[in-house]
Image (spheres, rainbow, N blue to C red):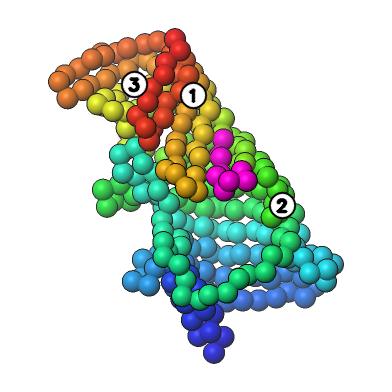
Amino acid sequence: LFSFYYKDIFMQFFQRDVSIGKVDFNIPTKTLTINDIYWAVPEGEKLLSAKEIQIKPDFKKLLKLQIAFEEVTIDGVKTYVVQKGNSYKLPPFLPERKSSLNFKIPKIPIVFSAITVSNSTVHLRRNGKDYRFLSELTVKLPSVSDKMSEIKPVISGNLNRKPFNFVGKTKFNENGDIINQFNVSSRNLNIAENRIFLPVFPGIKMQQGIVNLDISIEYIIRKKRKSSLVFSGAVAVQNLVLNTNVGQIADRLTGRAVVRRYDFTQKQLDVES
């Protein structure tokens, strides 16, 4: 009966199908555990799944009518991103059209003392095929609340089986825009092995070479305009081979360039040196 009601509520409010395998509350540890969750479109495609979610509420703040959690741990998340040229999109977690339910949700203070996502996987979907993209992914958010204007996630994992680790910053503007900024360093990135995951430069194909990166990435999710993905920083290459539609333009190129700004979505490149 409970399963029927929560499925019906999610379907009406979000137009999405949700499934929960098991729910358990441990009284000594005051921890709620939810197993085997998935979020899907009504046609059946899974958009996101998780092996386990553990929630430890802060009962003192709950008594003060605050939604507060001492700790939230999410394990075994699986999802994907879709690449179309220079565009990267998340799955349609929520429908574009508005819900058929018409009511206002009251504003209640929300506080998360710590959120951790671990052992997670993100695939890259390109031309209808899924490629292994991010694996053994861990995301740590030290503190989150509805009143925060900025959070600083710590992210680590494997990018196409190569380890990475970086600290980011996400800003929430008053106009509804979300600005995500990350500093990324990578050494000895093999283009031939990772070509499928690299951004597409207009009119240029990277065939092979070794790349070292010290760059800043900015991904802005705009409420009223098109989102943008921009990077800037230093790029050093060894034995780089570049082709265009008319032929080869670089053969075993070695050097270093400082990119002031490259906008993947607008195809704008500004090189400093």
Label 2: few (<14), some (14–19) or many (≥20) C-alpha neighbours in 10 Å? few
Q: Work out how far the residue at label 1 is from the one at label 2, CA to CA, in angstroms.
A: 30 Å
The vertical placement of 40 against 161, above or below, is: below
**Amino acid identity at mark 3:** Gly
Which residue is depicted at the point 60% across and 71% down? 104
Q: Is residue 10 visible?
A: no
Which residue is depicted at the point 26% across and 14% down? 250
**Amino acid identity at mark 1:** Ser
Tell me which segment is drawn in magenta.
172-181
On the image, the x and y values in percent for residue 257 come to 43, 13
Q: Nearer the viewer, residue 207 or 43?
A: 43
What residue is pinned by disc 3?
Answer: 209
Label 3: few (<14), some (14–19) or many (≥20) C-alpha neighbours in 10 Å? many
What residue is pinned by disc 1?
Answer: 232
Q: Work out how far the residue at label 3 is from the one at label 1, CA to CA, in angstroms.
A: 20 Å
Q: Which numbered disc flags the more N-terminal residue, 2 or 3?
A: 2
